[in-house]
Amino acid sequence: MRTLTTILQLALAALLCSCDQQHSASGIDPQLGLECFESHHASLPAGTQYEGIEKLAVNRLIIKIMNGVKVETLDCGLNPDGTLRSTGN
């Protein structure tokens, strides 16, 4: 029984260690993701949460959000200097 308990504890520890922690895409300022989220905030359902940066595509920052039902992505345009493009709001 003790061996089984030890094996289960080791398996659980390995599983927890293998879980992907929320890393922002390298080289991207995490604040930029928050600014992108805020630029969409007025059009999102109440309670929507920012989850993190998904990736940087050609002149687009793609972020993850939780809309209360599922995780989705949103994107924001970027200026050539890497700042967030104005949405006109």
Image (cartoon, rainbow, N blue to C red):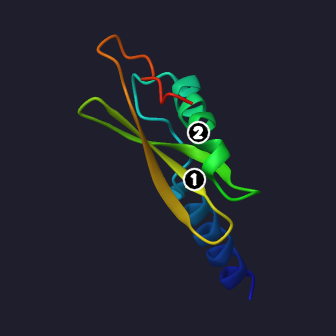
Q: Is the residue marked by circle 2 packed among few (<14), some (14-19), or many (20+) residues within 10 Å?
A: many
Left or right of residue 16, residue 80 in this image: left
Label 1: which secondary element: strand
- Residue at mark 1 to residue at mark 2: CA–CA distance: 8 Å
Along the line of sight, which residue is nearer the eye, 29 or 68?
68
Q: Is the residue marked by circle 1 packed among few (<14), some (14-19), or many (20+) residues within 10 Å?
A: many
Residue pictured at 61% horizontal, 50% vertical? 43
> Horizontal and vertical percent for residue 9?
68, 71
Are discs 1 and 2 less than 8 Å apart at CB? yes
Label 2: which secondary element: helix
Quarter of the rendering occupied by the N terminus = bottom right
Quarter of the rendering occupied by the C terminus = top right
* Residue position for label 1: 65
Along the line of sight, which residue is nearer the eye, 26 or 57?
57
| Residue 48, quarter of the rendered image | bottom right
Outermost residue, bottom side: 1
Outermost residue, left side: 58
Residue 37, disc: 2
